Image (cartoon, rainbow, N blue to C red):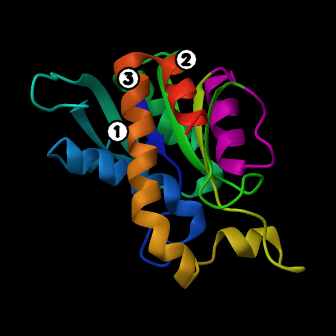
Amino acid sequence: MFAVIGLGNPGPKYENTRHNIGQHVIHELARRAGSSLSVHKQSNTRAASVRVGIGPGKPGEQAVLGVSNGYMNTSGGPVSSLMKYFKIAPADLIVIHDDLDLPFGQLKLKRGGGAGGHNGLKSISQSLGTQDYIRLRFGIGRPPGRQDPADFVLSDFSSSENKEIDLLIALAADAVEDILLIGLDKAMMRLHTK
């Protein structure tokens, strides 16, 4: 079983910010599975145990979808607790997060690596004691001009970006389904050659 985690901050104030794009992908995966997230008290998350990639002739693969009820910088504790509860190894964790170093809309898969200045990833790596988990990087681009990156990630997408966001969320959800159904290597090949 995999754990699929979308990073972000709680509450309506942050709901549509760039930093919360990972959570939107989780909600899309839950919708596709005919489910929704509910409070998981043991881990301070909202989670759902679902079959991902279901459809005619496709039984899907079991996964736990989750988002932390805490803030981005403290994602590690809730994520680690959720994984312990469901007995999921770090190697079977997929984290979906915003990435300043990729152009807006670019999606990249990788296993392991550093946090790249992302406090959510840093917190998860510290809590798990390893960086060896899968990341789906969702490009949000660099801030314009001299805007502070911290302010940029907490701002809403622009009106032109919003026109593309639903399609990009769907493509990100497709990539997660591919990891579960055909494996990371084939999913990477499919995503990175589009």
Residue shown at 39% from the left, 47% from the top: 45
Q: Which residue is mark 1?
A: 65
Q: Quadrant of residue 104?
A: bottom right
Front disc: 3 or 1: 3
User: In what element is the residue under mark 2?
Assistant: helix
* Magenta run includes residue 122: yes
Q: Which residue is mark 2?
A: 185
**As rendered, which of 28 and 12 lies closer to the eye?**
28
Q: Quadrant of residue 185?
A: top right
* Residue at the outermost left position: 56
**Residue 37: x and y, percent?**
26, 50
Residue type at numbered disc 2: Asp
Which label number is shown at residue 180?
3
Instruction: Give the quadrant of the C terminus.
Output: top right
**Mark 2–mark 1 distance (CA, rounded to whole Å):** 21 Å
User: In what element is the residue under mark 1?
Assistant: strand
* Residue at the outermost right position: 146
Specify the segment rendered in magenta. 113-132
Relative to 104, residue 147 above or below: below
Instruction: Specify which label sits upstream in the sequence, 2 or 1.
Output: 1
Report if the CB atoms under discs 2 and 3 are less than 8 Å apart: no
**Mark 2–mark 3 distance (CA, rounded to whole Å):** 11 Å
